[in-house]
């Protein structure tokens, strides 16, 4: 281990390690003009950046960052594109010259300003190459360690970390920037960032920038119980404010330092300052925590998987995890075809469906003969990374697709699987170790599948011994109980259960089974699968590969969680039952009302499901259809309009009531005679969204409202040419014509329609509306104006009268 | 010209307050029953699953400007007194574009045809607000980066068709942001299709 690195680790055993404060803030104070490239300006003014470095070392920083935050090929490209490697080397040398051993030097790597695949357009390997270029320059300049900082995108942080780790083995810190809501802009929470980055080999993880120290206490607190490495907090000097055209921060030195104790108590071992902090608050911070001994990591390993947005912990007492099995082309012709064509739409849909059905993880398999499985796996994993928040299980019989997937996957994945076969062990254990993946330990060897639990235990121990050589612990794998078909060997299911029990109770690791194999060849397979799941759950099973769309299976899983104490207060069970019941039905109170009141309440409540029954009930009770329409339903819908006018109702309620009314009126229609509110008896209204405009939701609302008030509505749709509107006027002879438009460019079409109608001798009145339409504009083109659907009905009633 | 920055997937939570407001909800006035709130929540969740937010952005230096005309590289020009006022202290512009994709529009069409206008209206409102929030998200992304350059974005942004910035400028935005890569087309009337697609321009100013 290098001397600098040893010093860094020694300090952390005694007191918090202190990083420097803001560089940009200091450079601006010392004359760096706005708009220049800070890195290039520092190369031209080494004395200024040297003085900043020196001041931070004097203030007590143990580690000072090189001024290379934006010294990557992309950002330097904005300033003429000097060679990134030499810029980094030069700036590291300037730091070295200025500090002369007074503080350690961290090679600083910031974001490129671009998003990396799958979240952006930059190819993952291009990003790794860009960061490697930077890392090599910094290394040549003699840095003692690295810091990858201010990352908003976990994939970019991964690319940078892989680049550094593939360049050298120096201590590497990674800090993400979380918003006040506790996620990065790209949606990664602190625990998920930690899970992914510490597994990938970061020596320290934490947060910088974005918020002041108060919010960071929460972020550090969320990470600490799961961290196997020291945590970093490098907050801004409070929150930014603009004062006189300049950004300032709302904490002074003592405020800032006063918060440091809370950060250490929450679990931070490495502290510093970001935007707005200067040597003064940094010195105060160091003094404030000088006697505080940071807490060592609380654990040595973590059994958890992550996507870019979510972490799944395999901790005792957690619910049994369901691994959705659908994204597997075996026996699925449509998926096979899609994979052959290089498409991912069906797989993405399957991912969303399984997520909705309650899966916790998704198995991904691209095993179609004759295709480039490495590419297919990479493309699919990238597509699924954005389509679902669930962590992925990389399932392949070959090592190469697994390696490709692990490299580009923006989380910590689970490999399915690593067996005791020599070739697999040799190829896959180093890959799993490099990318920090968990794996399913499949207890079989080149000789085949051991029949009994005892023989499987021997293989489990042998694979574990090999895995330990690569740094794995029992937290890093799930042992497959190996499910064999009950139809061919009645004793096989019991051996699986015994294996699960042994692993859980004796060996002390986690387990997984692929459920459906147990029922192969049997009728009514779902009952066998479900019963087997219950038995395995009772034996301590951690995860099951299954189809989450199976209603029985999910109910049994949830019930087993309750009975096994894995669902606290049965909260998940209750939520699952409520969801399955469709969110509950209307209360009993309405059932006690007379039939006509039920109809009224259904309209007021927008209860489309119930109105059919209520109208039928009212007719059966002898109520006259016309009376029901005129004395109950029309007043009810008028009242809805009034409530909308008073803002007691909002749009969804107005429309739900309108749709309920429509259903009710359609039911009454056969019983109504002429002159008794029959559909269309109040007259015909022709409506259209004008040519060029495709926004028609408002027009559709107006049509619904008008129909409910007894008008026949001829709806011509959207993007309708003036000539057609005028032609249809001649055909339907409407009492009123309604026109809608959303855009300023299309609004002018209204004028043309009216002018053309008049030229053709049509004298019908027009009413217009839409987002940009005003009363004044309506008047200027000789039309009436209505603000919304309710007002349209009122205006048209007046016009028709 | 700066490299186009694209965001293949913008992950944001539906901005519930804005969606409710767009649907006419008013605090202390509108009364929603628990069942209605649940149904609304489910429709918004459905919108979330149908909307795939993608975005693109490009920084361009302002070559010259007066009270009406902003000249950009490549003989590009934006004419608008309102925009010129917004960009009075800006040295660069940031062009932004975002789309929610076609799936949600298709769902709105299907719901409308199937007499479920209630859900169509909720999907419509959720999509509009989520696309707008995607622009906010991109602005937040650039704000973080610009702070390091002692720069910031103007407090507001401007879209074609508003004030005196003609909708015809949409073509310039559509081309420069290469929105076709996301399947967004421009009609003869300069309307972006699919419907839930937006563009905007903000200014970039130095802060000291």
Image (tube, rainbow, N blue to C red):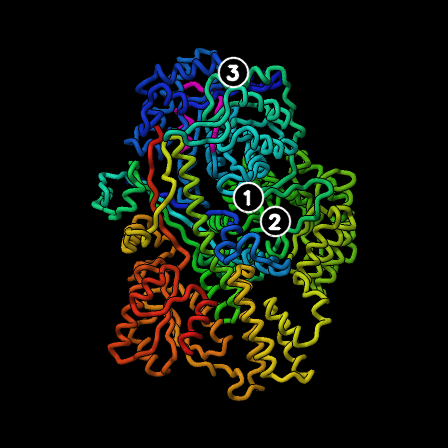
| Residue B93 percent across, percent down from the top left | 31, 41
Mark 1 vs mark 2: give the one in front. Answer: 1
Quadrant of the rendered structure where residue A698 is?
A: bottom left
Q: Are marks 1 and 2 on the same chain?
A: yes
Residue at 28% from the left image edge and 31% from the top image edge = A80
| Residue for badge 1 | A309
Q: Secondary structure at mark 2?
A: strand
Closer to the chain start, of discs 1 and 2, is 1
Extent of the magenta region: A130-150
Q: Which residue corresponds to the image point at 63% horizontal and 59% vertical from the top-left?
A: B33
User: Is A516 in the magenta?
Assistant: no
Identify the image quadrant of the N terminus of chain B. Answer: top left
Give the residue number, with chain letter if any, for mark 3.
A283
Q: Nearer the viewer, residue A290 or A668?
A: A668
Reading the image, the residue beneath label 2 is A361
Q: Identify the mark nearer the N-term, 3 or 1.
A: 3
In space, the residues marked 2 and 3 are separated at their CA atoms by 47 Å
Q: Residues within 10 Å of mark 1 (few under 14, many from 20)?
A: many
Q: Nearer the viewer, residue B155 or A789?
A: A789
Q: Earlier in the sequence, mark 2 or mark 3?
A: 3
| Vertical placement of residue A674 versus A406, above or below | below
Q: Position of residue A664 (x, y in %)?
A: 58, 77
- The CA span between labels 1 and 2 is 13 Å
Closer to us: A60 or A505:
A60
Q: Chain of mark 1?
A: A
Residue B207 versus residue A393: which sits nearer the camera?
A: B207
Circle nearer the viewer, 2 or 3: 3
**Residue A428 screen position, x and y as percent:** 57, 40
Q: Residues within 10 Å of mark 3 (few under 14, many from 20)?
A: many
- Which quadrant of the view contains residue A354? bottom right
């Amino acid at each position: 281990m290098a001397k600098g690195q040893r010093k860094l680790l020694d300090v952390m055993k005694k007191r918090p390690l202190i990083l420097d404060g803001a560089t940009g803030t200091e450079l601006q104070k010392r004359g760096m003009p706005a708009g220049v490239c800070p890195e290039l300006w520092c190369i031209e003014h080494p004395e200024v950046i040297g003085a900043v470095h020196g001041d931070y070392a004097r203030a007590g920083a143990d580690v000072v960052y090189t001024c290379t935050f934006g010294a990557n090929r992309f950002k330097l490209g904005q300033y003429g594109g000097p060679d990134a490697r030499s810029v980094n080397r030069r700036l590291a040398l300037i730091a070295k010259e200025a500090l002369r051993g007074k503080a350690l030097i961290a090679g600083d790597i910031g974001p490129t300003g671009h998003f990396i695949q799958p979240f952006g357009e930059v190819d993952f390997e291009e990003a790794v190459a860009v960061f490697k270029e930077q890392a090599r320059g910094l290394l040549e300049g003699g840095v003692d360690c690295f810091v990858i900082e201010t990352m908003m995108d976990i994939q970019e942080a991964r690319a940078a970390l892989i680049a550094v780790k593939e360049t050298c083995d120096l201590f590497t810190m990674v800090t993400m920037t979380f918003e006040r809501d506790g996620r990065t802009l790209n949606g990664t929470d602190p625990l998920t960032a930690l899970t992914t980055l510490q597994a990938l080999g970061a020596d320290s993880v934490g947060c910088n920038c974005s918020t002041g120290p108060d919010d960071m206490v929460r972020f550090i607190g969320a990470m600490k119980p799961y961290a196997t490495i020291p945590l970093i907090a490098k907050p801004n000097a409070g929150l930014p404010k603009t004062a006189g055209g300049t950004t300032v921060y709302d904490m002074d030195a003592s405020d800032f330092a006063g918060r440091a104790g809370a950060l250490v108590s929450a679990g931070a071992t490495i502290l510093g300052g970001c935007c707005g902090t200067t040597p003064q608050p940094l010195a105060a911070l160091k003094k404030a925590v000088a006697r505080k001994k940071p807490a060592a990591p609380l654990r040595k390993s973590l059994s958890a998987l992550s996507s870019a947005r979510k972490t799944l912990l395999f901790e005792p007492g957690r619910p049994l995890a369901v691994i959705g099995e659908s994204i597997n082309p075996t026996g699925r012709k449509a998926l096979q075809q899609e994979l052959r064509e290089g498409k991912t739409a069906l797989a993405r849909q399957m991912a969303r469906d399984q997520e909705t059905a309650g899966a916790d993880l998704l198995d991904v398999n691209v095993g179609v003969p004759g295709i480039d499985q490495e590419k297919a796996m990479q493309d699919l994993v990238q597509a699924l990374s954005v389509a679902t928040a669930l962590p992925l299980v990389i399932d392949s019989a070959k090592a190469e697709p697994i390696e490709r997937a692990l490299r580009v996957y923006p989380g910590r994945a689970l490999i399915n699987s690593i067996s005791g076969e020599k070739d697999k062990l040799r190829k896959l254990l180093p890959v799993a170790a490099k990318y920090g993946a968990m794996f399913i330990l499949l207890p079989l060897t080149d000789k085949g599948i051991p029949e009994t639990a005892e023989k499987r235990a021997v293989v489990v121990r042998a694979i574990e011994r090999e895995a330990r050589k690569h740094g794995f612990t029992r937290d890093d794998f799930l042992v497959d109980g190996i499910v064999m078909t009950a139809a061919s060997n009645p004793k096989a299911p019991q051996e699986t259960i015994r294996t699960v029990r042994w692993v859980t109770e004796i060996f002390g690791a986690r387990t997984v089974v692929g459920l459906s194999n147990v029922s192969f060849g049997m009728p009514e397979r779902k009952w066998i699968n479900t019963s087997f799941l219950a038995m395995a759950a009772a034996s301590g099973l951690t995860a099951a590969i299954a189809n989450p769309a199976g209603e029985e299976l999910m109910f049994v899983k949830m019930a087993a969680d309750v009975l096994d104490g894995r669902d606290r207060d049965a909260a998940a069970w209750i939520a699952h039952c409520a969801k399955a019941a469709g969110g509950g039905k209307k209360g009993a109170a309405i059932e006690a009302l007379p039939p006509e009141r039920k109809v009224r309440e259904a309209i007021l409540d927008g209860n489309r499901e119930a109105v059919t029954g209520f109208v039928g009930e009212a007719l059966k009770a002898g109520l006259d259809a016309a009376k029901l329409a005129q004395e109950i339903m029309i007043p009810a819908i008028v009242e809805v309009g009034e409530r909308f006018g008073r803002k007691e109702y909002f749009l969804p309620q107005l429309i739900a009531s309108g749709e309920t009314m429509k259903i009710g009126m359609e039911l009454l229609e056969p019983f109504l005679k002429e002159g008794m509110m029959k559909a269309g008896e109040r007259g015909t209204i022709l409506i259209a969204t004008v040519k060029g405009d495709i926004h028609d939701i408002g027009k559709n609302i107006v049509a619904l409202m008008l129909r409910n008030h007894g008008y026949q509505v001829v709806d011509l749709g959207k993007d309708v040419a003036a000539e057609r509107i005028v032609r249809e006027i001649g055909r339907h002879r409407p009492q009123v014509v309604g026109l809608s438009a959303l855009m300023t460019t299309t609004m002018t079409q209204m004028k043309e329609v009216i002018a053309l109608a008049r030229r053709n001798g049509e004298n019908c009145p027009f009413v217009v509306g839409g987002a940009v339409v005003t009363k004044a504009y309506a008047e200027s083109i000789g039309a009436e104006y209505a603000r919304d659907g309710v007002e349209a009905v009122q205006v048209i009633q007046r016009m028709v009268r | 010209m700066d490299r186009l920055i694209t965001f293949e997937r913008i992950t944001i939570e539906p901005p519930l307050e804005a969606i409710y407001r767009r649907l006419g909800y008013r605090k202390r006035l509108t009364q929603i029953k628990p069942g209605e709130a649940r149904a609304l929540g489910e429709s918004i969740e459905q919108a979330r699953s149908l909307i795939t937010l993608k975005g693109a952005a490009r920084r361009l230096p302002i070559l010259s400007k007066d009270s009406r005309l902003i000249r950009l590289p490549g003989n590009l020009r934006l004419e608008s007194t309102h925009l010129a006022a917004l960009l009075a202290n800006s040295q660069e512009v940031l062009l932004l574009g975002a789309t929610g994709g076609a799936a949600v529009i298709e769902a709105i069409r299907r719901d409308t045809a199937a007499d479920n206008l209630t859900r169509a209206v909720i999907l419509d409102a959720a999509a509009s607000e989520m696309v707008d929030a995607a622009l906010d998200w991109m602005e937040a992304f650039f704000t973080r980066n610009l702070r390091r350059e002692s720069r910031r974005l103007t407090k507001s942004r401007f879209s074609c068709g508003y004030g005196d910035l003609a909708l015809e400028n949409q073509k310039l935005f559509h081309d420069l942001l290469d929105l076709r890569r996301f399947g967004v087309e421009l009609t003869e009337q300069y309307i972006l299709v699919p419907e839930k697609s937006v563009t905007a321009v903000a200014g970039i100013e130095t802060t000291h």
